[in-house]
Amino acid sequence: MKKRKKGGKIVQELFDRYDRILSGELKKIDIPGNKEFKTYAVTNFRGGIGKTTLSFNLAYAMCQKYMTLFLDMCPQQNFTSLLLNCTKPYMGNSIYDALMEKMMGAAWQMEDKKLSLRVQDSNSEFRNGETCYFIPGSSRLFLFPSQFYSRLNEYLGMTSSGNGEKPVSVLLKILKNIIEEQVTETKTEKVLIDTSPFFAGGTHLAWAASDALIIPVRVDEQSIYSLELTLEMLYNPNSDFNIWRERAGIEEKPTVQAIIMTHCGWNRQADHQIDSASRMYIERAVDISIRYKEVFTTPNVVDHFALLSDFHSSGRISGSKAIPINNLIEGRQHRIEGRKVEVNRSVNRYKKELEYAFNLINC
């Protein structure tokens, strides 16, 4: 019973902070954690939770402060479509080409074109920020896991390379090396990776390349389960991620800097209150996170939570029109699939919520 009371008090801190955020006290709230993170991966082992919409809006916020490199590691390529502001398949060099060139050497040659594209050249919404770049995704990333793990197992039996590094380590660091090369070429300061909901292949490499993870969690049963799977993969020494890390002799691994609860319902009867169903899922997410507190940047895991409302029409407009929610104007109408959709007044609340979420990763 005492433990439950203590947990309830911890969760209440989160809801009290949410009230302060919506009351305009954002600048008075301390942000926890290391301020030196450079590379972030947005990750969770479930689709349909608003991950790419979140990545897109975080990308816009990062662009306001930093020259940033964005990377699409999801074969669905939704992040690429938003940054390109185009739904047609991208036909140039992609992250898949860069990975295969690293892995296959002379057997795989990329076209003589730049890998990183300037965001401002394709999405005008980003023109008021710092110059940012992105590496497009590819549907061929669906094929990558089988190719990657076949090569990993092949490398496992090899002796160390000339500089003493294990061949498995060389392979696990190919994405990290691509990112470092592109950061040098584009002179960017930060990196944000949108990952696939499947761990194998691209997401595995994204974790190996990242300093910190951002985990979106929708307020539903499957998302709570996937949160536990995600934290377990990072924590458990016998997970695929940690087994391969040990085989490679890689000591570092990412830490969890942000758990961002999405699609939280709004209690219409009281200001700044989450509805009871959403509250229940948030409490469960906090309880699970406390059990895995060792993988968080700081021991007080509730400090790493942010709450986002169900964005309704604003989220639909943002995802369909490639417009960051911060740039949506209350009352303005947009045509989506032949229908007019209006930005309602709740967009002003959404902007405050997103600002706090960004502050959690703002270094």
Image: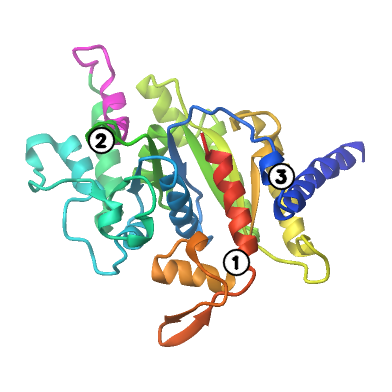
Helix, strand or loop at label 2? It is helix
The reply to whether the magenta stretch includes residue 133 is no
Reading the image, the residue beneath label 3 is 286
Looking at the rendered image, the disc whose residue lies closer to the viewer, 1 or 3, is 1
Provide residue 168's location: percent of width, then percent of height.
Answer: 29, 26
Looking at the rendered image, the disc whose residue lies closer to the viewer, 2 or 3, is 2
Relative horizontal placement of residue 116, taking residue 34 as reference (left or right): left
User: Closer to the N terminus: mark 2 or mark 3?
Assistant: 2
User: Closer to the N terminus: mark 1 or mark 3?
Assistant: 3
The span shown in magenta is 159-176
Q: Residue furthest right?
A: 1
Depth order, front residue of 342/182: 342
Reading the image, the residue beneath label 2 is 178
Depth order, front residue of 234/313: 313
Position above or below: 112 against 176: below
The residue at 39%/37% (across/down) is: 190
CA gap, disc 1 and disc 3: 26 Å
The residue at 25%/47% (across/down) is: 95
CA gap, disc 2 and disc 3: 35 Å
Relative horizontal placement of residue 57, taking residue 67 as reference (left or right): right
Q: Disc 3 residue type?
A: Val
Reading the image, the residue beneath label 1 is 347
The answer to whether marks 2 and 3 mark residues whose Cβ atoms lie closer than 8 Å is: no
Helix, strand or loop at label 1? It is helix
The residue at 45%/23% (across/down) is: 252
Task: Give neighbour class at mark 2: few <14, some 14-19, many 20+ (Cα, 10 Å).
Answer: some
Provide residue 211's location: percent of width, then percent of height.
Answer: 46, 31
Q: Disc 1 residue type?
A: Val
Relative horizontal placement of residue 342, taking residue 66 as reference (left or right): right
